Every structure is written in C-alpha cells, then in structure tokens.
Image (cartoon, grey):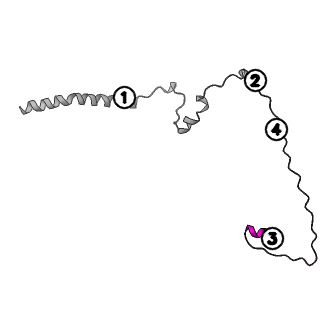
C-alpha cells in the first residue's frame, strides 16, 4: 500500500517536472542562440541617449530638397564696438598725495573719489 501511494505521488508531480524541464530547455536554447554575424550591422550597446536622440543611421531619411524652395541667406549685420568716450585728463597739483583705501565694494566708491 505504501508503494502505491509513493507511485501516485510521483505521477502527480510528473506533469510539473515535465513543464519545468521544457521551460529550462527553451530558456537555455534562447540564451545560447545568437544570430549570424553576417546579418548584424554593428554590435553596440543600447543607451538611454538612443531613446531621445537616435543615431543618424536610425533616423528617417530627410525629405527631398526640391520639395521646399531654398530660403535666401540673410547677411549678418556688422557689429561695431561703440566709440569709447574721451576721458578728460585731470592734472594733479604739486602737493597731491596717495591714499590707500581698504575695504569691500562699498569702499571702491570712496577710492574713486
């Protein structure tokens, strides 16, 4: 009687074991399978950058140029520096002295005076 119960327990587990073996076999075959290298363009890793900024080879081809007329090119304006104002030269008196002003940016106004 004990042998019969053991046999029945093994027969109940048999479908689960077969399914597990099939899944393991298919998973191993899928992991080992590799496409032919002659059909591969270039093996490069995928990155998040490819999602937002695809590489040129993956982009859609641009529309033909004859579909849209060419815009006339605008001339860039010539940028000229403004003329520097003439600073009047102040002549120093003979008894002029040099003063050292120490401080932060507030003291610079005093130093200029």
Q: Can you give x and y, in whole percent of width and height, for residue 45 in the image? A: 51, 36
- The Cα–Cα distance between marks 4 and 2, rounded to whole angstroms, is 21 Å
Mark sitting on residue 21: none
Secondary structure mainly formed by the magenta segment: loop
Residue designated by label 3: 111
Residue designated by label 4: 76
Judged from the image, the secondary structure of the residue bearing numbered disc 4 is loop
Residue at image position (60%, 29%) is: 57
Tell which of 42 and 94 is nearer to you: 94
Tell which of 26 and 62 is nearer to you: 62
Look at the image and say whether residue 105 sits in the magenta stretch.
yes
Residue designated by label 2: 69
In this view, the mark in front (2 or 1):
2
- The Cα–Cα distance between marks 3 and 2, rounded to whole angstroms, is 62 Å
- The Cα–Cα distance between marks 3 and 1, rounded to whole angstroms, is 83 Å
Which corner quadrant of the image does residue 10 belong to? top left
Q: Can you give x and y, in whole percent of width and height, for residue 29 in the image? A: 36, 28
- Name the image quarter holding the C terminus: bottom right
Residue designated by label 1: 29
Proximity of marks 4 and 3: CB atoms separated by less than 8 Å: no
- The Cα–Cα distance between marks 2 and 1, rounded to whole angstroms, is 56 Å
User: Furthest residue to the bottom?
Assistant: 95
Locate residue 98 relative to residue 28 in the image: left or right. right
In this view, the mark in front (4 or 3):
3
**Can you say whether 26 is above or below 91 in the image?**
above
The tag earlier along the polypeptide, 3 or 2, is 2
């Amino acid at each position: 009687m004990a042998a019969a119960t053991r046999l029945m327990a093994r027969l109940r587990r048999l479908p689960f074991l077969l399914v597990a073996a099939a899944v393991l076999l298919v998973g191993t075959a899928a992991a080992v399978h590799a496409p032919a290298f002659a059909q591969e363009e270039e093996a490069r890793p995928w990155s998040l950058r490819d999602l937002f900024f695809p590489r040129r080879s993956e982009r859609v081809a641009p529309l033909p140029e004859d579909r849209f007329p060419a815009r006339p090119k605008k001339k860039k304006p010539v940028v000229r520096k403004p003329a520097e104002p003439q600073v009047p030269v102040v002549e120093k008196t003979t008894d002029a002295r040099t003063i050292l002003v120490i401080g932060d940016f507030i003291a610079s106004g005093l130093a200029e005076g």
